[in-house]
Image (tube, grey):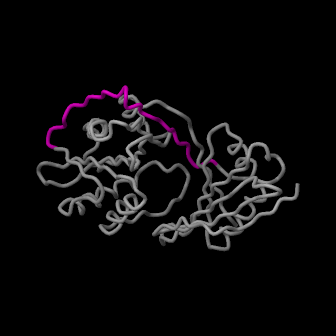
Amino acid sequence: MSITITPLTDPDYRPFSRRLAWLASGDHPVGSAYLRLHSKPSQEHLAELELSVHPADRRQGIGSLLLDAALEAAAENGATTVLADATVGSAGDAFLAARDFTVGMRLVYTRLALADAKPTAEPVAGYRLTSWVGVPPDELIESFTVARAAMSDAPLGDIAYGEEVWDVARSRQVAEVVAQRGDLLETVAALEESTGEVVAYTELVVPGNGQGDAQHYGTVVVPTHRGRGLSRWLKTEQIRRTTQRHPDLAGLLTDTAATNQPMRRTNQSLGYQETHQVHRYHLLLN
């Protein structure tokens, strides 16, 4: 079968990135590739690849043709690092490894079934919890944005992502983008009682229809407030509020760097069960 690689127009445009797309076809579609290019100055070197070939059409060089098109486009657009995820042990895992991609980190994916979730946690002295849906309240958005910077020391393996810069405008924009696609961004935050400032938070994106599984966006504790049980308290409260607000929701999904043992222990203690692991590959372009 003769294969044609056709560039497509992808409507998935976001404020700080855009996506290129290709379709592989013979007498029928057999595969696709998507390449996300970043426009933030600190991440212009990155391109994120998603590539798939129908199982019945694999081992005919289709994946390699799609990969060649994506890597050429990445270089033409100034990217120097291409990232790609593959489930450990999958065909994609073997494909990327055979094409000189290197594993930069391993992610552990877990799920909490809400029907069985009854976690408990003791309040932490000196703090109180609050919550909101969507954009953070005006009186908290500045300290919330400062707390976001604590993500800068999250485990990243061997991948150079570039510096993440946060300001109030970007904090608002993240919530607005989630709302625009019809979902809910729900946040539980810990406030230091003596200052009233956000020092920890956990975010969850809930499908707009309140069904299926919700996705954690992240849990962050400012370094000087770690080791006190805030993350477990936050997550316990988030589970409680989620089951009350969304009784038809089935579960919560999260992924954690394999090396992030404290967060993995917290999730396990709350009842999250591992579903699979993913290799995050990177390829440096010449």
- Segment colored magenta: 103-127
Q: Is residue 103 left or right of residue 155?
A: right
**Quadrant the C terminus occupies:** bottom right
How many numbered marks, from 0 up? 0
Q: Position of residue 34 (x, y in %)?
A: 63, 60
Residue shown at 41% from the left, 38% from the top: 252
Q: Is residue 140 left or right of residue 20?
A: left
Q: Position of residue 136 (x, y in %)?
A: 26, 58
Residue 165 sits in which quadrant?
Answer: bottom left
Residue shown at 55% from the left, 68% from the top: 18
Residue 127 sits in which quadrant?
Answer: top left
Along the line of sight, which residue is nearer the eye, 31 or 255? 31
Position of residue 136 relative to residue 233, above or below, is below
Q: Is residue 259 left or right of residue 263?
A: right
Residue farthest toward the right in the current orientation of the protein? 1
Along the line of sight, which residue is nearer the eye, 5 or 48? 5
Q: Position of residue 60 (x, y in %)?
A: 84, 50
Position of residue 151 relative to residue 264, above or below, is below
In the image, is residue 109 part of the stretch drawn in magenta? yes
**Quadrant the N terminus occupies:** bottom right
Q: Is residue 233 left or right of residue 44?
A: left
Q: Position of residue 184 (x, y in %)?
A: 35, 52
Residue shown at 41% from the left, 48% from the top: 207
Residue farthest toward the left in the current orientation of the protein? 194
